[in-house]
């Protein structure tokens, strides 16, 4: 019976979608709003302005995921209102970016609730989307299932993501290079970051073909940080050169692939292609995924 249920789910997922069959699409998401990797208010404003202006030039919808405590420390409601004024959506990334692996269910519920007020003020309603910090969705079955039920009852859709380019790692090294006035290394890193991003886009497209037998709408995980503020134009061009069309998160998540059951309890922050493979019993080899350059990791 379980095998038959999996086959039925897989059949539904593999049904062609006429409107998307001939075109790649990607939804852009930005975690750690107002910004990661800085405690300087002027930098926060600059990073957001650069990203928002580039998104506008490329007619690219996006969703920003807010850490409310960080908003109070580094910015204020004006920043969120600017996202909304420009037509971008906001999602909940908890109050303090606490790791669900380290908290009880009741403690984490308060993180979710505490992350709502500034978004409600900016949007006029509770956010539709929630993303777990580190993509840690529950390290035990009890925690996973309890939080899944809580989020659903509160009206949330889980903002899954399908492409990770480890921008947080590159940004940590990049910030050190800039602080050290190491211009040569910074220039080298910018090139490496764009090359790695392009490689990861292709890798995850291939992973989803392996899991579903077709490409699916992608959800790109990025962060609001200095590196992306400096290179967002080039990142967007990578998608355009690979014939991707930018869509909203709602549009991407409407694909049947995103209705794959979510039952996996795991302590790691896997991208959803790997989770779906486990759910559907499809064997994939994660060791084939390219790693960020070792020299960047070591810097």
Image (cartoon, rainbow, N blue to C red):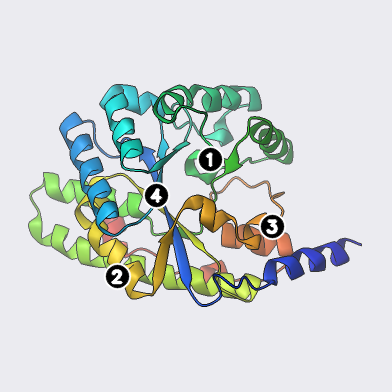
On the image, the x and y values in percent for residue 61 come to 39, 52
Graded by Cα atoms within 10 Å as few (under 14), some (14 to 19) or many (20 or more), the crowding at tag 3 reads some
Q: Residue reaching furthest right?
A: 1
Label at residue 260: 3
Looking at the picture, tell me which residue is in the foreground, 94 or 78.
78
Secondary structure beneath disc 2? helix
- Residue 72 is left or right of residue 277, and the answer is left
Quadrant in which the C terminus appears: bottom left
Q: CA distance from mark 2 to mark 3?
A: 31 Å
Sequence-wise, the earlier of marks 2 and 4 is 4
- Of badges 2 and 3, nearer the viewer stands 3
Label at residue 129: 1
Asked if residue 25 is positioned above or below residue 150 in the image, the reply reads: below
Label at residue 62: 4
On the image, the x and y values in percent for residue 84 come to 36, 37
Secondary structure beneath disc 3? loop
Looking at the picture, tell me which residue is in the foreground, 173 or 165.
165
Looking at the picture, tell me which residue is in the foreground, 5 or 269.
5
- Residue 55 is left or right of residue 155, and the answer is left
Asked if residue 236 is positioned above or below residue 63 in the image, the reply reads: below
Asked if residue 108 is positioned above or below residue 12 in the image, the reply reads: above
Q: Residue at x 69, y 31 (%)?
A: 153
Graded by Cα atoms within 10 Å as few (under 14), some (14 to 19) or many (20 or more), the crowding at tag 1 reads many
Sequence-wise, the earlier of marks 1 and 4 is 4
Asked if labels 4 and 1 touch by Cβ distance under 8 angstroms, the answer is no
Asked if residue 181 is positioned above or below residue 116 in the image, the reply reads: below
Can residue 173 be seen here? The reply is no
Secondary structure beneath disc 1? strand
Q: CA distance from mark 3 to mark 1?
A: 17 Å
Q: Residue at x 30, y 62 (%)?
A: 236
């Amino acid at each position: 019976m379980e095998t038959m249920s999996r086959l039925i789910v897989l059949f539904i997922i593999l049904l062609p979608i006429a409107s998307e069959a001939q075109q790649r699409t990607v939804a852009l998401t930005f975690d750690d709003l107002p910004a990661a990797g800085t405690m300087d208010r002027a930098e926060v404003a600059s990073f957001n302005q650069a990203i928002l202006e580039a998104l506008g030039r490329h007619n690219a919808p996006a969703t920003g995921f807010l850490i409310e405590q960080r908003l109070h420390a580094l910015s204020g409601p004006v920043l969120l209102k600017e996202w909304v004024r420009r037509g971008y959506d906001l999602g909940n990334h908890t109050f303090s970016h606490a790791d669900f692996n380290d908290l009880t269910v009741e403690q984490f519920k308060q993180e979710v609730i505490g992350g709502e007020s500034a978004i409600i003020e900016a949007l006029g309603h509770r956010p539709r989307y929630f993303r777990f910090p580190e993509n840690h969705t529950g390290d035990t079955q009890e925690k996973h299932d309890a939080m899944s039920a809580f989020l659903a009852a509160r009206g949330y859709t889980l903002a899954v993501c399908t492409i990770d380019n480890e921008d947080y790692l590159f940004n940590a090294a990049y910030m050190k290079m800039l602080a050290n006035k190491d211009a040569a290394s910074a220039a080298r890193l910018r090139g490496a970051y764009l090359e790695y991003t392009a490689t990861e886009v292709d890798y995850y497209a291939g992973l989803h073909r392996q899991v579903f037998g077709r490409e699916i709408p992608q959800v790109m995980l990025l962060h609001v940080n200095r590196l992306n503020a400096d290179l967002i134009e080039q990142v967007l061009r990578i998608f355009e050169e690979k014939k991707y069309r930018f869509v909203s998160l709602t549009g991407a998540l409407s694909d049947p692939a995103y209705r794959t059951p979510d039952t996996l309890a795991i302590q790691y922050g896997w991208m959803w292609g790997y989770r779906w493979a486990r759910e559907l019993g499809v064997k994939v080899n994660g060791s084939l995924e390219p790693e960020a350059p070792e020299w960047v990791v070591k810097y």
